[in-house]
Amino acid sequence: MSESVEVMRVGEHSYAAEVHEAGHTTEHRVVLGQEVLDDLAPPPPEESAVVVETVRYLLDRRPSTALPHDIDLEELREADAGFLPELRARLGG
């Protein structure tokens, strides 16, 4: 299934993500904790790329309509042991 993910920075370590998938558009708020960013470095990844790949990671597991509105990377890392290693791989690290 084809989807597109658009992100826009709305604050420090905070992004709005819009997902277009199968005729549906969903909106999400994604918060990146400094700890997660530190765990992905060095070199520090571009935050918008982290957000896009996080949303794509979640879309591999469920449809966009099932994604939570608020996505906190710290909480995701704690709940899903495979998240951080997969995110590193997706970001080329």
Image (cartoon, grey):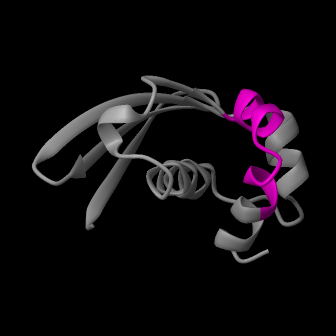
Residue 75 vs residue 29, the one in the foreground: 75
Would residue 1 be found to the left or right of residue 17 on screen?
left
Where is residue 12, by image quadrant?
top right
Residue 21 vs residue 32, the one in the foreground: 21
| Magenta run includes residue 76 | yes
Would residue 77 be found to the left or right of residue 46 on screen?
right
Residue at image point 29% right, 59% down:
4
Measured along the vertical axis of the image, is residue 43 above or below residue 58?
Answer: below
Residue 67 vs residue 34, the one in the foreground: 67
Segment colored magenta: 73-85
In the displayed image of the protein, which residue is found farthest to the left?
23
Residue 2 picture location, percent across and down: 26, 67
Where is residue 31, by image quadrant?
top right
Of the 4 image quadrants, the one containing the N terminus is: bottom left
Residue at image point 22% right, 49% down:
20
Q: What secondary structure prevails in the magenta region?
A: helix
Residue 77 picture location, percent across and down: 78, 39
Residue at image point 55% right, 58% down:
53
Where is residue 66, by image quadrant?
top left
Residue 90 picture location, percent across and down: 65, 70
In the displayed image of the protein, which residue is found farthest to the bottom?
92
Residue at image point 52% right, 48% down:
58
| Magenta run includes residue 17 | no
Of the 4 image quadrants, the one containing the C terminus is: bottom right
- Count of labels shown? 0
